[in-house]
């Protein structure tokens, strides 16, 4: 199983997953041109992607969606937003697993200020599991349950509490980001990570970092501290870059 971030952050999000038989994108929030360029960097064309699964309707996750001819899976509650603009539309229900070839996809509800936002648990028939939550304002028992036993985690580390308090953002925007329907702070994400550590966890990708309200070194320090507290020395960490390919992860 192979994974790679194509983009991460408020300027666009997309994550590539390849089982060897199935290739999907989780979100496609950059231009079609950039999507093609970054896939080309992996030696892949967009026509080789089997499907896109969409976490929620915000533009930084859906910018390329209307221009794709491959199957696009969206939540049933958002279908009216896409039925006139997406040529190959498929529907999923939050909480109901479905297959894309050999990949089992389980969308699950997450707290975020969108119509029907979801995270994804992706599992192969060889029992490799990836958990992805990139826009989430608070951690629920359901989120922990769906992410547990993952071999790779893609977790939002959006903002540092000190940086956001003194940033130039308007107070109303700061409140939205910090709300239970906004985004996760480094500390909140670190606590989530700590609860998900297990012997089969191989790699954690820190995702959706704010360009203004966070720094990679702050997010990494928090994640390293969480792993240290659990005595987890062999789990790898990386930060998903904003506007270029991330590390290719193989499990």
Image: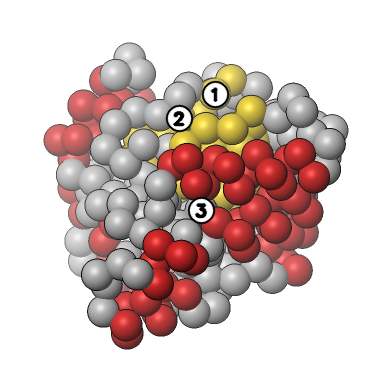
Cα distance in 3D space between marks 1 and 3: 19 Å
Residue 232: x, y in percent? 79, 34
**Is label 1 in a helix, a strand or a loop?**
strand
N-term mark: 1 or 2: 2
The quarter holding residue 60 reads: bottom left
Q: Name the residue rendered at 32%, 85% in the picture.
A: 172
Asked if residue 17 shows in the view, the reply is no
For the residues bearing labels 1 and 2, Cβ distance under 8 angstroms = yes
Is 223 rendered above or below residue 251? Answer: below
Residue 159 located left or right of residue 131: left
Work out whether 86 lies above or below 69: below
Q: Nearer the viewer, residue 40 or 101?
A: 40
Pointer 2 or 3: first along the chain: 2
- The crowd level at tag 3 (other Cα within 10 Å; few <14, some 14-19, many 20+) is many
Asked if residue 231 can be seen in this view, the reply is: yes
Residue beneath disc 1: 249
Q: Which residue is mark 2?
A: 4
**The one of 172 and 240 positioned closer to us in this rendering:** 172
Whole-percent x and y of residue 33? 15, 35
Q: Would you say 146 lies left or right of 39 here? A: right
Name the residue at the bottom extreme: 172
- 127 vs 1: above or below: below
Q: Quadrant of residue 59?
A: bottom left
Real-space CA distance between mark 1 and mark 2, rounded to the nearest whole angstrom:
6 Å
Query: Considering the numbered disc 2 on the image, is that residue within a helix, a strand or a loop?
Result: strand
Residue highlighted by disc 3: 157
């Amino acid at each position: 199983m192979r994974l790679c971030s194509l983009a991460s952050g408020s300027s666009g999000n997309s994550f590539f997953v390849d089982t060897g038989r199935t290739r999907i994108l989780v979100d496609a929030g950059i231009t079609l041109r950039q999507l093609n360029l970054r896939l080309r960097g992996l030696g892949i064309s967009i026509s080789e992607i089997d499907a896109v699964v969409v976490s929620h309707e915000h533009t930084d996750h859906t910018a390329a969606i209307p221009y794709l001819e491959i199957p696009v899976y969206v939540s049933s509650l958002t279908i009216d937003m896409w039925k006139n603009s997406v040529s190959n539309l498929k529907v999923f229900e939050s909480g109901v697993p479905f297959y894309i070839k050999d990949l089992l996809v389980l969308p699950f509800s997450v707290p975020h200020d969108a119509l029907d936002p979801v995270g994804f648990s992706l599992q192969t028939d060889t029992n490799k599991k990836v958990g992805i939550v990139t826009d989430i304002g608070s951690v629920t028992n359901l989120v922990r349950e769906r992410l547990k036993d993952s071999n790779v985690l893609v977790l939002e580390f959006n903002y540092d509490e000190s940086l956001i308090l003194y940033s130039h953002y308007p107070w109303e925007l700061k409140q939205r980001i910090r709300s239970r329907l906004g985004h996760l702070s480094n500390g909140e994400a670190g606590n989530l990570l700590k609860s998900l550590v297990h012997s089969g966890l191989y790699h954690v990708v820190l995702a959706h970092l704010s360009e203004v309200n966070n720094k990679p070194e702050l997010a990494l320090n928090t994640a390293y501290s969480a792993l240290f507290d659990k005595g987890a020395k062999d789990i790898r960490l990386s930060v998903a870059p904003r506007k270029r390919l991330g590390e290719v992860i193989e499990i």
